[in-house]
Image (cartoon, rainbow, N blue to C red):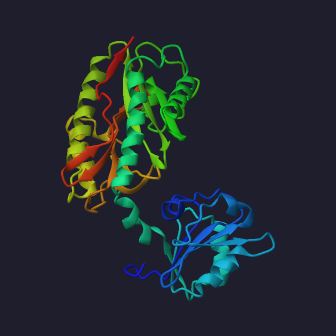
């Protein structure tokens, strides 16, 4: 906060709060907010009925429970005084920010995003966080291995049914929450964030499965494709390009390189094979307590990769109305080189 010139950090619902306090707030109309003055002690302002859920850490923050007849925004304002610069959480409800503006108008207070303070802390994972990502990745790998082994039936089932099956297996393998389980067959795989529906999976389909969840506070995210029956030559050749592109992106994720270098490395391979116009998203996103967080592996992001940066490498090729494919691992940058969190087979496994 001192380096960034921030006088007050205000964190409400979202992952910054459990990162700093160990407490995850319910997204309620009642305000929960961690108030951190630059030159004072931290206070967790919380509805009285929610206070019993907090594991107190008096050496980290003071608990200020507020009653139903109190104004929690006024309590926050009183705790800080009048800051020149206030950093507010990205996921704070707008209603609370609007009410806060009544106490601290913009003619005296400048508002910035909490990322001004939090990004440097959260982007670089420590050893315990990397271990948590490894455990989450290993659990997702076990589900991917079941997919590749044919233990998750595909033929004749709907995308939605397979998605539910994968979700249940993520929980069985140790995840606390399933964040997503994309299952996209054939032409539907050309939509990167396809919502699994009633499309029945058929012989000859390429099926894209992108899934992940949260385990002990940290996220997994993996994408693998399988072919039902021997894939057409076009698909097999495109997948070989994708495989090479993903490996190139991983190899580029070294300490000191720019984040955009990861995107460039994967995109260069795909463009050289003539599929450049069909790679329609960034190559990766950061991951940690959130499935998507900084740093982002995208053109224009010149941020140097630092030890502990955790991110996905997930190039894709999408031909509208025909087929799509993506290959994704989570990687952590280390001084010894990129460390993968995923080891499930990268091949286009053929089933049936």
Above or below 88: residue 271: above
Above or below 220: residue 108: below
At 45% from the left edge and 26% from the top edge, which residue is drawn?
Answer: 187
Residue 260 appears left or right of 1: left
Query: Could you tell me residue 127's position as x and y percent?
Result: 33, 54
The furthest residue to the right: 69
Query: Could you tell me residue 37's position as x and y percent?
Result: 52, 81
Camera-nearest residue between 68 and 56: 56
At 38% from the left edge and 50% from the top edge, which residue is drawn?
Answer: 285
Residue 271 appears left or right of 323: left
Specify whether residue 281 is in view: no
Above or below 101: residue 18: above
Query: Could you tell me residue 137's position as x and y percent?
Result: 38, 39
**Viewport quadrant of the C terminus:** top left
Camera-nearest residue between 261 and 211: 211
The furthest residue to the top: 352
Specify whether residue 79 is in view: yes
Camera-nearest residue between 185 and 134: 134
At 37% from the left edge and 21% from the top edge, which residue is drawn?
Answer: 148
**Viewport quadrant of the N terminus:** bottom left
- Total number of numbered labels? 0
Query: Could you tell me residue 282's position as x and y percent?
Result: 35, 48
């Amino acid at each position: 906060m001192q380096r960034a010139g921030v006088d007050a950090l205000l964190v409400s619902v979202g992952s910054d709060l459990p990162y700093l306090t160990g407490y995850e707030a319910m997204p309620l109309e009642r305000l929960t907010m961690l108030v951190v003055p630059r030159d004072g002690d931290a206070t967790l302002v919380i509805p009285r009925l929610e206070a019993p859920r907090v594991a107190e850490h008096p050496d980290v923050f003071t608990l200020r429970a507020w009653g139903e007849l109190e104004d929690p925004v006024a309590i926050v304002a009183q705790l800080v005084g009048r800051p020149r610069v206030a950093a507010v959480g990205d996921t704070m409800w707008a209603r609370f920010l609007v009410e806060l503006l009544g106490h601290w108008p913009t003619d005296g207070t400048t508002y910035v995003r909490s990322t001004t303070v939090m990004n440097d802390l959260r982007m670089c994972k420590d050893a315990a966080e990397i271990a948590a990502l490894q455990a989450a990745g290993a659990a997702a790998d076990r589900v991917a291995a079941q997919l590749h082994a044919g233990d998750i039936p595909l033929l004749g089932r709907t995308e939605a049914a397979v998605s539910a099956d994968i979700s249940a297996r993520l929980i069985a393998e140790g995840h606390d929450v399933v964040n997503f389980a994309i299952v996209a067959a054939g032409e539907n795989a050309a939509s990167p964030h396809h919502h699994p529906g009633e499309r029945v999976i058929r012989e000859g389909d390429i099926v894209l499965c992108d899934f992940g969840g949260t385990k002990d506070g940290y996220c997994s995210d993996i994408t693998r494709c399988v072919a039902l029956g021997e894939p057409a030559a076009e698909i097999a050749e495109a997948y070989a390009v994708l495989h090479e592109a993903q490996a190139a992106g991983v190899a580029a994720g070294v300490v000191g390189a720019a984040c955009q270098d990861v995107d460039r490395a994967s995109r260069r391979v795909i463009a050289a094979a003539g599929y450049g116009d069909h790679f329609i998203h960034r190559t990766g996103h950061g991951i940690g307590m959130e499935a998507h967080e900084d740093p982002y592996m995208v053109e224009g992001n010149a941020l140097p990769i630092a030890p502990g940066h955790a991110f996905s490498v997930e190039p894709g090729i999408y031909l509208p109305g025909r087929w799509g494919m993506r290959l994704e691992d989570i990687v952590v940058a280390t001084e010894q080189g990129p460390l993968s969190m995923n080891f499930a087979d990268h091949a286009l496994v053929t089933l049936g």
